[in-house]
Image: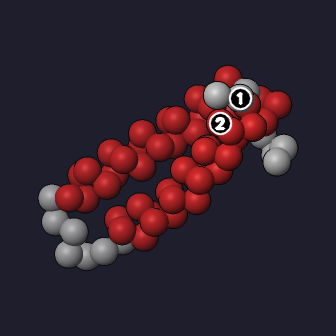
Amino acid sequence: MDSQAMRERITVIESKRQFLVQLLEEPNLGILRIDVNQALEELDELIDEFKRTFPESIGNP
């Protein structure tokens, strides 16, 4: 996989993160709140790791 393809995938992942944030705000989420919160944490770690590994990709389409 080339760096452009990885950059595109990370962009898609970043855009889907907002959905999880909105889901976390639902009052009737119950015990699933733990799973949604864990997913958000893992997404954030993935995005941070990508940016540390490929710093030249930050802000470059």
Looking at the rendering, in which quadrant would you find the N terminus? top right
Image disc number at residue 2: 1
Q: Which mark is residue 6?
A: 2
Q: Are marks 2 and 1 in contact (CB under 8 Å)?
A: yes
**Which residue type does callout 2 highlight?**
Met
Q: Residue furthest left?
A: 31
Residue at x 68%, y 39% (from the top left corner): 5
Which residue occupies the foreground of this view, 61 or 19? Answer: 61
Q: How far across and how far down the image is residue 35, in percent?
A: 26, 50
Camera sees residue 52:
no
Judged left or right of residue 47, residue 38 is: left
Q: Residue furthest front?
A: 1
Visible in this render: residue 47? yes
Element type at marker 2? helix
Question: As displayed, is residue 14 above or below residue 19?
Answer: above
Under mark 1, the amino acid is: Asp
Image position, residue 39 (x, y; %):
36, 47
Between the residue at mark 2 and the residue at mark 1, the CA separation in whole angstroms equals 7 Å
Q: Position of residue 22 (x, y in %)?
A: 42, 70
